[in-house]
Amino acid sequence: MERMRIAGAVRAGVAAAACGVLLTTVAACGADSGDGGSGDSSGAHSSADGGRSDEARAVDLKTIPDVGARYQKQIPADSQQVVAVYGDGKNSADSTIVLYTKSGDTWKKDRSWSGHNGKKGWTTDHQEGDNRSPVGVFTLSDAGGVLADPGAKLPYTHSASFQAPHYWAKSHWHDFDYVIAIDYNRAKGTSPNDPTRPQGQSKGGSIWLHMDHGSGTSACVSQSKANMEYLLKTLDPKQHPVVVMGDKADLKAA
């Protein structure tokens, strides 16, 4: 019985720590917004062939579009997969997510869809509880979730400890069915729900790509279940994937 009691406490603590909030914070990933439906309904848009348009197939790119020199040079030379998150505005919770893949020295747009970011928008100086997503370039090295591994190439931790507390709005219960850790203030090579914060608690942490509930998050980036599954099956540690994320104005900075 004691083991069961401890396990239950750990599951609740882990879920409450997700998406850049402290264990004592009740609202996570937009839990106080009251918006959205089920966790896999983000309203994502894509073309009939899975999101790739004729234009995307035809255009060869030497750099990631609409990303200025400041962040372009932060993309590791060996990275061949980039998830670009283009925020609609500094204070907007809406964003467009694009997956780019590289062959030789050429980038190609794989597919794109809609998603959400921090409910208050973006910041270049993320702090715990500010409800803004951090702008920058971050590696993607670990994944997990409540649901069984769908065939992820990244190391995947399947655990009920990801379950969002059921005192959150029902629309948020499936947020963490699938997650991919964004390597912001975390220990790479560990489960996404590892609480380690190398830069300290004040800088936030547990910032993930995860399933969408129809509105802004506390700092994470959210998208539909189908698009999360696609990323899990596509992002390959051998390709050194990274996320380039921020509002459009900041991303374009020289």
Image (cartoon, grey):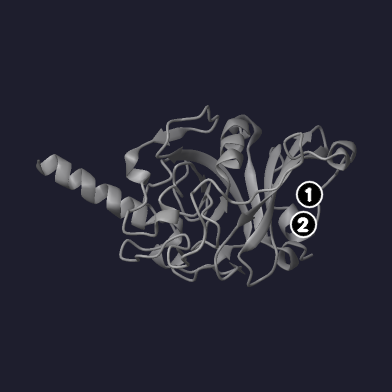
- Seen from the viewer's position, the closer of residues 118 and 65 is 118
What amino acid is at disc 2?
A: Val
Disc 1, SS: loop
Above or below, comparing residue 120 to residue 134 in the picture: below
Taking the view exactly as shown, the residue that stands out farthest to the top is 151
Residue 4: image location, x then y, percent: 16, 41
Residue 44: image location, x then y, percent: 65, 48
- Seen from the viewer's position, the closer of residues 212 and 197 is 212
Asked whether, in this view, residue 57 is left or right of residue 80, the answer is right
Q: Which mark is residue 232?
A: none
Mark 2, residue position: 67
- The residue sitting at 56% across, 36% down in the picture is 229
- Count of numbered tags: 2
Label 2, label 1: how far apart the Cα atoms are = 6 Å
Above or below, comparing residue 246 to residue 9 in the picture: below
Asked whether, in this view, residue 23 is left or right of residue 43, the answer is left
Q: Quadrant of residue 78?
A: top right
Q: Quadrant of residue 136?
A: bottom right
Mark 1, residue position: 64
- Label 2 close to label 1 by CB (< 8 Å): yes
Categorize mark 2 by other alpha carbons within 10 Å: few (<14), some (14-19), many (20+): many
- The residue sitting at 82% across, 40% down in the picture is 53
What amino acid is at disc 1?
A: Ile
Quadrant including the N terminus: top left
Quadrant including the C terminus: bottom right
- The residue sitting at 64% across, 69% down in the picture is 92
